[in-house]
Amino acid sequence: MDLSLLRSLIAVADAGAITEAANRLGLTQPALTRRIQHLEQEFGAELLSRSRKGAQLTELGVLVEREARVLIDRYDSLKAEVASHNNVEGGTVRIGGGATAVSFVLPNAIAEFQRDHPQVHFQVKEAGSSEIASDVAEGRLELGLVTQPVRTAGLEIELLLDDHIVLIAAADNPLASATNVSVTDLDGQNFVGFEGGSSIRQIVDSNLREAGIEINVVMELRSIPAILRMVATTGNLAFVSQLGVHGQELVREIEVTGIAITRRLGLAWRKGYTLSPATSRFAERLMAQRSRKKGRR
């Protein structure tokens, strides 16, 4: 269906006359008449009745004109949305990550990006790495910050940063004032852990098993702020991302000998997929920040 034919019918309906509608469309009267005739052939029905008083829609013409307005409105809206996605300004960035990434990596990056591109809209999802990876692979998200390695197929992943996992305790915990804390001192201690099955929990548990240490997880939480608060008030210990400890006073970071836990956060996108301009520019900004941090070391 040629939408110009539908637009011509709407113009005649609004003007009430072929001549006036032709003027509004910048067409000659015969050219507009031919368009209407083509449309009538398309539907196999008379859509306009002509008289000395002008042109009026037939009963079927009213039906076609009403639906034509809906179709054209939808088309114009779709065209505008596609145009916005093809432009950095006004585009949408659909990105997801785990609790650490969403709380401590993305906020500053998004704020800095929106200072330069205030019309860009962000849709941010917080979930576990496996769910985020699936969302990216299936097109629900364009970018994902995930813990490597990732088992989901069909993804391209670039290392974004090494996230150091550190031990924390309340200020009055005996380990917080110890001059030398060994990993063996953690054996049998009560811990607040990340929820079971999460990537960071698996990494912590694996490293402790390799060190021959067994801890007592008395509570499981999802977010770092909740874990910090619980450690500060209950006296339990926890392993969390160093990103979440910087600049806060609730707990103290404790250096532990005999163990070093690091996870790799990667930026993932669907293999063979062309990112929208806004998303591509934001991904470049994230990777540039990684390069700057490496340069300061």
Image (cartoon, rainbow, N blue to C red):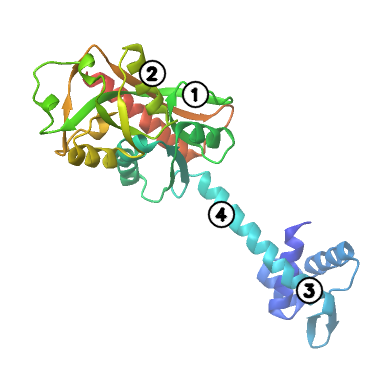
Callout 2 crowding tier (Cα within 10 Å): few <14, some 14–19, many ≥20: few
Q: Earlier in the sequence, mark 1 or mark 4?
A: 4
* Mark seen at residue 206: 2
Helix, strand or loop under label 3 = helix
Outermost residue toward the bottom in this view: 53
Helix, strand or loop under label 2 = helix
In front: mark 2 or mark 4? 2
* Mark seen at residue 80: 4
Residue 197 screen position, x and y as percent? 45, 30
**Of 179 and 95, which appears nearest the observer?**
179
* Mark seen at residue 150: 1
In front: mark 1 or mark 4? 1
Helix, strand or loop under label 1 = loop
Q: Earlier in the sequence, mark 2 or mark 4?
A: 4
In front: mark 2 or mark 3? 2
Q: Amino acid at mark 2?
A: Ser
Find out whether the residues at labels 2 and 4 contact each other: C-beta distance under 8 Å.
Answer: no
Quarter containing the C terminus:
top left
**Distance between the Cα atoms at labels 1 and 3?**
54 Å
